[in-house]
Amino acid sequence: MHSASWYLGHLKERVDEAMEEATSLPRSDAYTINGKPGDLFPCSKGTTYRRKVDYGKTYLFRIVNANIDSSLFFAVAQHNLTVVRLDGAYIKPICTTYILISPGQTMDVLLKADQVLGRYYMAGRHFSSDNAKVSEFGHDVTAILEYNGNYTYPTSPLFPKTLPMYSDFAAALNFTYQIKSLASPQYPINVPTDNDITTRMFITASMNSLYCEDSGFLSCTEIPISTSVNNISWVNPRSTDLLQAYYRNISGVYSTDFPDQPPTYYNFTDETYSKDTVLTVQGTKVKVLSYNESVEIVFQGTDVQGGSVNHPMHMHGYMFYVVGYGFGNYDNETDPKGFNLVDPPHVTTFGVPKNGWLAIRFIANNPGVWFWHCHMERHLTLGMEAAFIVKNGDTAETSILEPPAYMPSCCKLQNCDAERMTAQFEEQLDRAKGGKRKVTSRHETARCPIGTCLTFPERESRQKQDSWLCCGLFRAFELV
């Protein structure tokens, strides 16, 4: 069962406009279950997703929250749910009347069809940790659980009375506190102990305003909304993908100085803040880890600019153990005493509580370049992310894999017809954008057909350094 976001109009145009005008990014106009908003929306009434069931059987629902900005409460009218897996890892079964699922999370939920024959709403509702003054509650999303058999349908399916309200923090915490790893002989855990830890990081997650020098780009006053981790607001590389740059040893794409600590310590959860805590800088900074390092990260939420919310932190390439979380400022002396090293959740996504902290541990045993970020899309878009580079081990089995044989082939820059490709590309953009925008020469590369390369004049002097480039590996192009 798949829940996602639905927007009115052309979403990319709305996002582009918000980015240009430095305003808040659009929020979804509705949520969907398997592609349909449900009966509460006139546009989808009559096409609401239905799941037919037989009385007495037990069903496994694999629920994915693909909403880009919303955690969801979910319940089924008059039915109990049993959660058995989170992010693909077994957990101690949670018997509950509702669940809370964050963006990017997956849950395996058992439902026994043991109620009176009829139709029952399966409903999702946005859980808001925003300040009330900025919250925009959307309509509930619904699907229908429908029993097979001969019976008279009620006028409307029953709605779940156990579905928590939008800002029910108690309900959110009550569910989250129950999440524990199975930690059985058949499904053991391997949590790094205090003595195992070789790298400790303390990372703040904040709303900010962007500080920037006058370099031909937008000035600070034109970018009032930004996000950061440890006061670094992430910028995607303009030309070469991080993995390509690392694997091919291409310089100038990123730096390896992502900080282990924030630049300053202050009362992170206080409603008052200074200008120094508001302003952030942009960068493409990564943290380098040796193979098999044991890592502990404490994520600290802040209330800078009134932006404290639940941040669902997601890590690519790894699952991590959630050893602790709490509210207020993390205390390095007392809080570790309460860490759960017995049966902590083993996940890929977990929330940093509003005005609180989250402590995770993992072993860096998957070499490569791995993105990590807040799974709230508006926070990710504005810079709340970074990356780890995990170096190779001592063997081929513990080293990064070579590019697969089906990877699009590269071409030498001097063999590319750059002028022709540039003209074709600009023509396509003009048609797509109604002729309002063009690629400028200061941007070095753009996405082009697989197997070809596209370069702008500035790169010609760097041909010897970057003699092999693949368009298939370029992250994106920029428009002005």
Image (cartoon, rainbow, N blue to C red):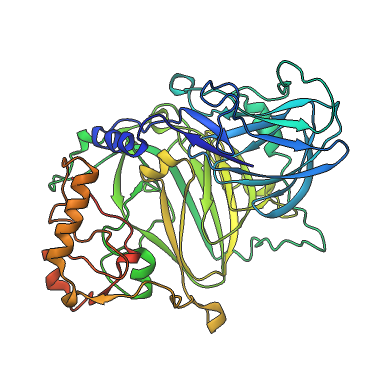
Residue lying at 63% horizontally and 50% vertically, measured from the top left: 322
**Quick check: 10 above or below 189?**
above
Question: Residue at left 42%, top 50%?
Answer: 385
Residue 77 makes an appearance in the image: no
Front-most of residues 136 and 6: 6
Residue 161 location (% of width, % of height): 73, 20
Please tell me in which quadrant of the rendered image residue 408 appears.
bottom left
Picture quadrant of residue 276: top left
The answer, for residue 397, to whether it is visible in the render is yes
**Quadrant location of the N terminus?**
top right
Q: Where is residue 28 in the image (x, y as percent from the top left)?
A: 45, 31
Please give the count of numbered marks on the rendered protein. 0
Judge left or right: residue 30 versus residue 408. right
Quarter of the rendering occupied by the C terminus: top left
Residue furthest to the top: 155
Name the outermost residue toward the front.
150
Percent position (x, y) of residue 65?
A: 58, 41
Residue 105 appears left or right of 13: right
Quick one: 144 or 222, which is closer to the camera? 144
Of residues 190 and 69, the one drawn nearer to the viewer in this rendering: 69
Q: Which of 409 and 301 is in front in this view?
A: 409
Residue 176 lies left or right of residue 455; in this view the side is: right
